[in-house]
Amino acid sequence: MLQPEAALISRQLAELHRAAQERLGLTGTLVAFKAWESINITAPVLGAEFMAEVLKITRALRPISYRLSARYYNLVRAIGSGHALPDIGESFTTGTVPLEELYAALAETLNEVVTSTTLDIRSTERPAPDDTQSEADNRTLDQRLDDLGDALTEMFQETFPDSEALAEPIELEEEDWDWGELEDESVTDEELLAEIEDKAIRDLQDIVDKELRSDRPMAESLARITDRADARGAVAASLV
């Protein structure tokens, strides 16, 4: 493959990888935000169901994110050098394989990205139109999720070289994947839950305690707690 074409495809793959990772992130955010609704806002310390849902989605999406990064990196490496590592999912492990096989491996993980967002996680409320805001500002997270889903297929197709380049042999190196360093730098389950506890649930509990000690009518205090709970839910979801 000619160098200018390889450079262009590598840039396109980088954009594809960024969009796919964003879609995974939005999935986690939307699931967490929906789970937040299960919390009793007058006793947020009892948010065990929310915490369990956060761990469930994090553990489901993290391996997909790893595979996506690995297969993106491997394909870019193959395009640039003609060499690659054995596939992270063991679709190919030794010898040589056509470049097309690396594209197929990435396509498999992109499909995981798309199917991971088919859960019933669409937000139930949409913002009212506001003439003072741009159209982009008025788009909800679930609309952004749909936009990315529509874009991923088209973006992926644009990265394909001609059939001759797809048939080029890629030599597989003997070294294997070692996620140790990446996993050491990633946030652990315990760290994630502690941060949510500190920045969302404990903060909401403080708000509840203050309102219960106030002289406001109960209906007014409950309305204030509900508003703050929505804000804390957004914070918690953003941490996933």
Image (cartoon, rainbow, N blue to C red):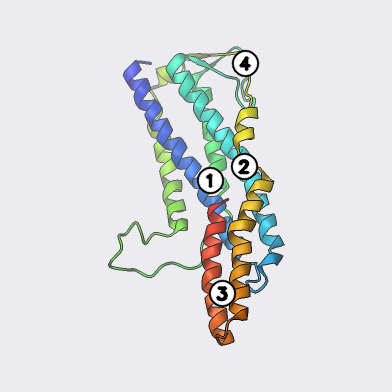
Spatial CA distance of label 1 from label 4 is 28 Å
Q: Which residue is mark 4?
A: 175
Under tag 4, what secondary structure?
loop
Tell me the residue at 41%/50% (across/down): 147
Type of the residue with mark 4: Glu
Query: Looking at the picture, how far across and down is residue 218, in whole percent?
Result: 59, 85
User: If you read the primary sequence from the N terminus, does the residue marked by circle 2 or circle 1 appear first?
Assistant: 1
Depth check, front residue: 106 or 133: 133
Query: Looking at the picture, how far across and down is residue 129, in whole percent?
Result: 34, 68
Under tag 3, what secondary structure?
helix
Q: Which residue is mark 3?
A: 225
Tell me the residue at 61%/52% (across/down): 195
Is residue 103 in view? no
User: If you read the primary sequence from the N terminus, does the residue marked by circle 3 or circle 1 appear first?
Assistant: 1
Count neighbours of disc 3 (C-alpha within 10 A) and say few if under 14, some if 14 to 19, many if 20 or more. Answer: many
Res 24 label = 1
Depth check, front residue: 111 or 174: 174
**In-image side of 123 versus 94 (left or right):** left
Spatial CA distance of label 3 from label 2 is 30 Å
Q: Nearer the viewer, mark 3 or mark 1?
A: 3
Type of the residue with mark 3: Ile
Under tag 2, what secondary structure?
loop
Count neighbours of disc 2 (C-alpha within 10 A) and say few if under 14, some if 14 to 19, many if 20 or more. Answer: few
Q: Name the quadrant containing residue 138.
A: bottom left
